[in-house]
Image (cartoon, rainbow, N blue to C red):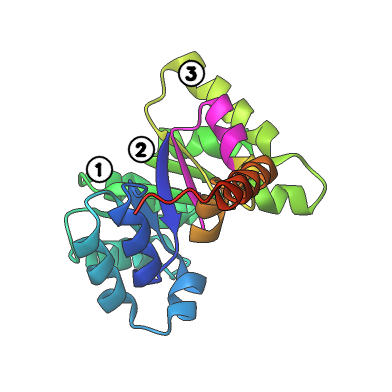
Amino acid sequence: MKFFVDTAEIDAIRELNDLGMVDGVTTNPSLIAKSGRDILEVTKEICDLVDGPVSAEVVALEADAMITEGRKLAQIADNIVIKVPLTWDGLKACKVLSGEGRMVNVTLCFSVNQAILAAKAGATFISPFVGRLDDINLDGMDLIADIRQVYDNYGIETQLLAASIRSANHMSECAKIGADVVTAPPAVIKAMASHVLTDKGLAGFLKDAEKAGIKIV
């Protein structure tokens, strides 16, 4: 399972990238706004930092304008993925942009039907949102599993990119289901290393080492 980092914060991306934990990056207008930087500038810096796909999202609502914005974003770097919303206009834009050989990430997916349409339109990635479904008392993991089943049924090549990831448990559940990619905030990726028994065991080892006067250097 590939790890994409869901942030526009350069330092956080660099730290994880240096550890080999970054296969790509996803951004959106909210993350760009949070960074406080120009979208073209920060996206270019991210693309220079990582080798994998970097999703940059359009802000237009109509297909023709999305296509224009998508083409401009694609000029930033060869590893740009144009991110469009899962609307009818977004699907139109996806069809055109993917037909031009560009990578497209169709985002804000909340149903299997939407995922099927995105694949038909040539999406490179489909981004179903796990956490936002959980927020309305639906199980977001059910959607990941259902899309995985349908895509596998028909050999669909669109990559299943689980998004809106809120916890380390989401990460492991996506891995078990077979998501191609999971995009998560840096804090969630770091939280995967944490376990209460690891902390407890380490505390015990250190206590015993202190008692025995163990020193290595």
Q: In the rendered image, is residue 78 in sight? A: yes
From the top left corner, tell me how far across and down residue 171 is, in percent: 57, 40
The stretch drawn in magenta includes residue 108: no
Under mark 3, the amino acid is Asp
**Mark 3 near mark 2, Cβ–Cβ under 8 Å?**
no
**In-image side of 5 versus 135 (left or right):** left
In terms of image quadrants, where is residue 62? Answer: bottom left
The relative height of residue 206 versus residue 111 in the rendered view (above or below) is below
Q: Are marks 1 and 2 in contact (CB under 8 Å)?
A: yes
x 50%, y 32%: residue: 179
At 18% across and 61% down in the image, what residue appears? 77
Q: Nearer the viewer, residue 168 or 110?
A: 168
Quarter containing the C terminus: bottom left
Q: CA distance from mark 1 to mark 2?
A: 8 Å
What residue does disc 1 label? Answer: 99
Residue 176's label in the rendered image is none
Per the image, label 2 sits on a secondary structure element best described as loop
**In the image, which residues are magenta?**
171-185
**Which residue: 62% across, 33% down?**
173
Question: Looking at the image, is mark 1 or mark 3 earlier in the sequence?
Answer: 1
**Residue assigned mark 3:** 152
Q: Amino acid at mark 1?
A: Gly
Picture residue at 26% right of the left edge, 78% below the top: 41
Q: Residues within 10 Å of mark 2 (few under 14, many from 20)?
A: many
Report if residue 177 lies within the magenta region: yes
Mark 3 is surrounded, within 10 Å at the Cα level, by few (under 14), some (14 to 19) or many (20 or more) other residues, namely few
- Residue 8 image point, x, y percent: 40, 69
Label 2 sits on what residue type? Gly
**Vertical order, 65 against 106 (above or below):** below
Q: Which residue is mark 2?
A: 122
